[in-house]
C-alpha cells in the first residue's frame, strides 16, 4: 500500500552473524531498553535530588519541570534519534516512515514542554501565565515564546501522535511475523494491487490472521507467540493512551499515581517490550528454538 514494503530483510538469506544485521538488531534492543527504563530512572533521580516529600508526579512529561529534567529531555532525544535513523537505508518500508514520524513527534514532545503544575493559589494555565505566575519552576523559553497554554496543546498533540505511531509499529511487526513464510509473497509484495483492493485485502488479512492465531492453521514458520506479543503490545499502547485521557488515578500505600502517568508508563513499557522482542533475531526458527530450550 502507498508503494511501501512490509519486508525489511530477507530472513532466509540474511546470516545471523552478519555485522549489519547485528547492528540493526542492536539498535532495536537499545530502543526497547530506553523505553523500558526511562520511566523508572526519572522517578529515581527525582527522589534522590529533592528534599520535599517523595511523590510521583502527575505525568512523565511533568518531570520536565523537576530535578530530572535533563534526563527526561536527554532520554527523549536519544530515543527520537534512534527512531529517526532506524532503517534509514530502507526508506520504502512501513517501518521507516512510521518510526521517522514517531521520532519527529518525540522531538516535539521533548522541546515543547507541558504546562507546569504550581501550588500557587489561583494558578491557571493561560496565555499570560508565564508572566503572572513566575514559579518556581519558571517557564522555559519555548513556553514563553508560544505561551504556556499553546505549548501544552502542542505537547499533547505530539504525544498523542507518538503513541498512535508506536502502536502502528507494533502492528507492522505482527503483520511481518504473520507474513513470514508462504504468505510473505502475498502480504509483502509491493507490486500487489493494494490500493485498488484495500477493503478486500484488509478483510482477507483479518480473517487469515484470526484463523492463524486462534484455530492453529499454519501460515509458515512464524512463531505464533511473537505475533500475539506484538498485537498485545500494540493494543496495550492504545489502551494506555485512552487511560491517560479518560482513566482514573491509582493509589498504592502512600503513593498516588495520576491517570496520565499510568497511561504514559504503560505505553512506554509496552513499547520497550515490543522492541526488545523485535531485536532478538531475524530468524523465526531460532526464536522457536530459544523458546524450546527455555521450556526444557
Image (cartoon, rainbow, N blue to C red):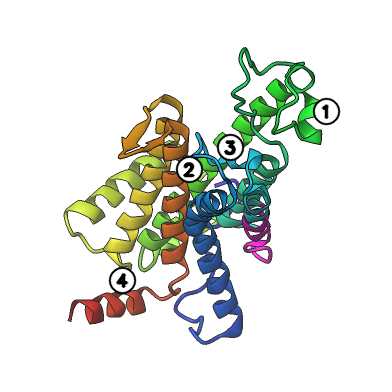
Q: 100 or 145: which is nearer to us?
A: 145
Kindly identify which residue carries mark 3: 62
Quadrant showing the C terminus: bottom left
Dot placed on the residue nearer the N-terminal end, 4 or 2: 2
Kindly tell me whether residue 199 is visible in this rendering: yes
The verdict on residue 89 being magenta is yes
What segment is highlighted magenta in the picture?
77-91
Q: Label 1 near label 2: C-beta < 8 Å?
A: no
Is residue 215 magenta-colored?
no
First in sequence: mark 4 or mark 3?
A: 3
123 left or right of 260? right
Identity of the residue drawn at 43% across and 58% down: 274
Residue at the spot of label 1: 145
The residues tagged by marks 4 and 3 sit, at their Cα atoms, a distance apart of 45 Å
**Residue beneath the point at 73% across and 20% down:** 133
Q: Which residue is mark 4?
A: 221
Chain-order first, disc 1 or disc 3: 3
Disc 4, SS = loop
**Of callouts 2 and 1, which one flags the residue occurring earlier in the amino acid sequence?**
2
* Residue found 40% across the figure and 36% down from its top: 257
Amino acid at each position: 500500500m502507498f508503494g511501501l514494503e512490509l519486508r525489511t530483510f530477507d530472513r532466509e538469506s540474511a546470516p545471523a552473524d552478519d555485522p549489519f544485521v547485528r547492528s540493526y538488531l542492536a539498535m532495536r534492543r537499545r530502543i526497547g531498553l530506553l523505553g523500558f527504563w526511562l520511566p523508572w530512572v526519572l522517578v529515581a533521580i527525582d527522589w534522590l535530588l529533592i528534599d520535599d516529600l517523595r511523590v510521583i508526579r502527575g505525568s512523565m512529561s511533568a518531570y520536565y519541570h523537576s530535578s530530572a529534567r535533563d534526563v527526561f529531555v536527554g532520554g527523549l532525544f536519544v530515543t527520537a534519534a534512534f527512531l529517526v535513523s532506524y532503517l534509514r537505508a530502507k526508506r520504502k518500508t512501513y517501518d521507516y516512515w512510521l518510526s521517522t514520524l514517531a521520532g519527529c513527534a518525540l522531538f516535539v514532545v521533548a522541546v515543547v514542554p507541558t504546562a507546569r503544575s504550581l501550588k500557587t493559589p489561583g494558578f491557571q494555565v493561560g496565555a499570560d501565565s508565564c508572566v503572572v505566575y513566575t514559579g518556581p519552576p519558571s517557564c522555559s523559553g519555548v513556553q514563553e515564546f508560544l505561551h504556556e497554554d499553546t505549548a501544552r496543546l502542542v505537547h499533547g498533540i505530539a504525544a498523542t501522535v507518538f503513541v498512535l505511531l508506536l502502536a502502528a509499529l507494533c502492528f507492522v511487526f505482527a503483520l511481518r511475523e504473520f507474513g513470514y513464510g508462504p504468505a510473505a509473497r502475498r502480504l509483502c509484495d509491493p507490486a500487489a494491487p493494494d490500493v485498488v483492493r484495500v477493503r478486500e485485502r484488509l478483510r482477507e488479512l483479518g480473517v487469515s490472521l484470526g484463523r492463524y492465531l486462534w484455530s492453529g492453521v499454519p501460515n509458515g514458520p512464524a512463531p505464533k507467540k511473537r505475533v500475539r506479543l506484538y498485537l498485545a503490545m500494540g493494543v496495550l499502547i492504545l489502551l494506555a493512551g485512552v487511560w491517560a485521557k479518560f482513566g482514573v488515578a491509582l493509589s498504592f500505600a502512600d503513593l498516588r499515581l495520576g491517570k496520565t502517568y499510568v497511561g504514559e508508563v504503560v505505553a512506554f513499557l509496552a513499547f520497550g517490550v515490543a522492541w526488545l522482542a523485535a531485536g532478538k533475531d531475524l530468524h523465526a526458527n531460532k526464536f522457536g528454538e530459544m523458546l524450546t530450550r527455555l521450556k526444557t
